Image: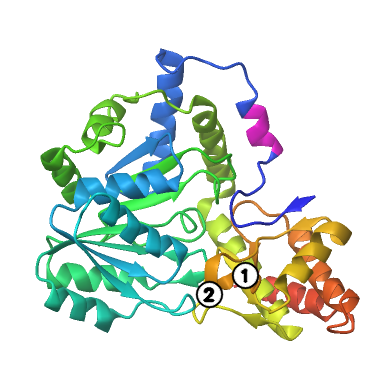
Amino acid sequence: MLLFTPGPTPVPEFIRTAMGMPTIHHRTSEFEEIFARTREYLKELIEMPEVLMLASSGSGAMEACVTSLCAKKLLSINSGKFGERFGKIAKAFKIPNVEIKNSWDIPASLEEVLEALEQNPDVDALCMQVCESAGGLRHAYELIAKAVKEYNPNILVIVDAITAMGVEPLDVSCVDALIGGSQKAFMLPPGLSIIGLSEKAIEKIQERDVGFYFNLKTELKNQVKNTTAWTAPTTIIIGLCAFLERAREIGIDMIYHQTKARSLACDAAMEGIGLKIYPTIPALSMTCVYHEESDKIRKVLKERFNVNVAGGQDILKGKIFRINHMGLVDISEISWVVNAVELCLNKLGMRKFNGLANQIFIEQYFRVIKQ
């Protein structure tokens, strides 16, 4: 079965081999050496002064960032399930929250963000996604973050990059907290979240000192010494170290370029056979296709062609399917998926198969890869 869901992504053999070594204790010099190496690789990747690894899914890191970096009022952008989650976290901790809510295919605009700030001068933190994976939408987070810092440099910008970290180069010049997750582009099992921090965020964390398990001041105190406050997810961190070492061998810029080529080519192939790309601004991490018969297409993909792609949630349940592009994806596998989608349409009587999808995919992929 080819796993092409946008998280969890497949775990490659070289990572499974690394994680399959005998377990080592997290309070040992052996693990501290691996932890130190992994921290340095992550800093190199995200280009931020400090980085933390937490034993949690990405939602744990989202909670930790909201509670640690917002003291007065949160401005959150809701264009999908995960933007909505920032608001739910604020509500759970009784933090005042202003929400900019859009359709799941529409990104936030700079104008509505600045208007919200004008109307709410007590906002001290902004939360948004790079990629809202519920619908495959890409926010222009870098432009919004820059404008927010120009408006008020004391507003802390929290960016969920769970389905963007390791997918594309990320501008963090105006970002205070950048959140990642193990089960996406890093091709690991779920259970590890990552937070990149700015100097301003570090100052705020030291000042706030809130929470227990998700107290980032406690974690920072320990992780700068290459250990963790609580039991570390040792096996996943060992796997992450292996992935980052392989990424350095390949070249992270090459991985970004290949990911972009796969994504743009797949989008073009789906449109070429009459399917609709759902978001108005698609993210590179996935191809999100809108179709009223999406569940039927997914069922045939899985049962006849051994391809597992993701469906939609809530308002998009049964109306979209999402094809992953995160991680080290072989071109032969994504080519199989593209071909299988067209064969599904043929089987369901929606479109006669003529191989056009794969032709478009290959042509577009190599056009981009040569650039």
* Residue 312 falls left or right of residue 48: right
* Residue 16 included in the magenta stretch of the image: yes
Q: Amino acid at mark 2?
A: Pro
Q: Residue at x 46, y 25 (%)?
A: 34
Task: Identify the magenta region.
Answer: 13-18
* Residue 68 included in the magenta stretch of the image: no
Residue 210 lies, in percent from the top left, at 19, 38
The picture quadrant where one finds residue 77 is bottom left
Residue 50 lies, in percent from the top left, at 28, 41
Mark on residue 287? 1
- Marks 1/2 in contact by CB < 8 Å: the verdict is yes
Which residue is more in the foreground, 23 or 43? Answer: 23
Question: SS for tag 1?
Answer: strand
Quote the CA–CA distance across marks 1 and 2: 7 Å
Q: Taking the image as drawn, is residue 338 in sight?
A: no
Residue 63 lies, in percent from the top left, at 32, 47
Tag 2 residue: 282
- Mark 1 or mark 2: name the one nearer the start of the chain: 2
* Residue 65 falls left or right of residue 60: left
Q: Residue at x 78, y 70 (%)?
A: 296
Q: How is the image coloured?
A: rainbow
Q: Taking the image as drawn, is residue 245 in sight?
A: yes
Residue 312 lies, in percent from the top left, at 60, 66
Question: SS for tag 2?
Answer: loop
